Image (spheres, grey):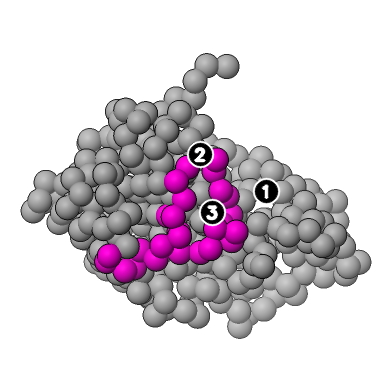
Amino acid sequence: MGPLKTFSDCSKNDLIVITGAGGFIAGALARYFHDRGFTRIRAVDKKPLPDWYQVVPRVESLCLDVSEEANCRRVCEGAVEVYNLAADMGGMGFIERFRIQCLRSILINTHLIEAAYRAGARRYFFSSSACAYNTELQKDPNCRALRETDAYPAMAERGYGWEKLMSEMFCQEYWAERGMKTFIARFHNVYGPHGTWDGGREKAPAAICRKVIEAKDRGAGDIDIWGTGKQTRSFMYIDDCTEGIDRIMHCDELIATPINLGSSELIAINDLVTLAEEIGGVKLRRAYDLNAPQGVVGRNSDNTMIKKILGWEPTTPFRKGLVQTYAWIAQQYEDRKAGHRTVHDTM
């Protein structure tokens, strides 16, 4: 097999900075560029190194909190490209309960984009979210897919969504006023191996897989589901996400232009549970917790724009991605039972 393809015009010796790299998506992005031969990658996260989800070999790994301005200046020294994926976030349970914590992530983008500009970085990527979209358009499980223009008039998800929308504006103004090339992707529910799978920050695919695995292990015949189970979402596999980031960051037609990065395959939570049961070889009684956080009723990604501009969209079928995710979580679960430290356990 030949060298893996990348869409960057950088030299393989140019410095790439990735923040949030101790987490799921940014850790996968560090590995993505490492595997494509980039030799100078600076990975940054505030967590202690043993708590990072992935530590990529031969990557400079810094434990710094990039909500602090001085740390952002240190992180961006010599950077050619900066990828900002650092944020306090998680699944709907976390987003609804910790709105102030989510809002405070605006400090990260505010300081980091200024530091990247002062350091002379050529390109800056911001990881936004579908939570930036108007929630009034997401009250039906059979919702129409969200277009990029649907963020305005603004009525974003409280806390997390508003932080994303304001940070997008920062990116747009740094291009308009200072000529810095910025790129903005609105992520739609990323999942896959090495993602959060317990502890309160996990998203629906990982949470449901874990609950099925736990029920099998304990011999329990039921599963707890947040909400009615009729809520719908699209879920994007991690490999599609990292490739999409690369493609978006290196397309000048998308400078300072928010774009959806997500699958257009709409899945109801009940169907997600059924699929996880099939993978696990079990059938469970369903108990619906109508008081639990459940977010908007329906959300899907309209991929018209990304297909038109990039000639590409995320294509991993949800069933295929969930099989791999389930297997990884099952191994994590067994490792923990055996007393081995898993990627989400702290010392």
Per the rendering, the mark at residue 148 is none
Dot 1 alpha-carbon crowd within 10 angstroms: few under 14, some 14 to 19, many 20 or more: many
In primary-sequence order, the first of circles 1 and 2 is 2
Per the rendering, the mark at residue 24 is 3
Q: How many angstroms separate mark 1 from mark 3 (CA)?
A: 13 Å
Q: Is residue 140 left or right of residue 196?
A: left
Cβ atoms at labels 1 and 3 below 8 Å apart: no
At x 63%, y 48%, the residue is 193
Q: Compared with residue 60, is residue 109 higher up or lower down, i.e. above or below? A: below
Q: Residue 210: horizontal and vertical position, in percent? A: 73, 61
Task: Give the labeled residue for mark 2.
Answer: 58
Q: Which amino acid does label 2 sit on?
A: Arg
Q: What residue type is labelled 3?
A: Phe
Q: Which amino acid does label 1 sit on?
A: Thr
Dot 2 alpha-carbon crowd within 10 angstroms: few under 14, some 14 to 19, many 20 or more: few
In primary-sequence order, the first of circles 3 and 2 is 3
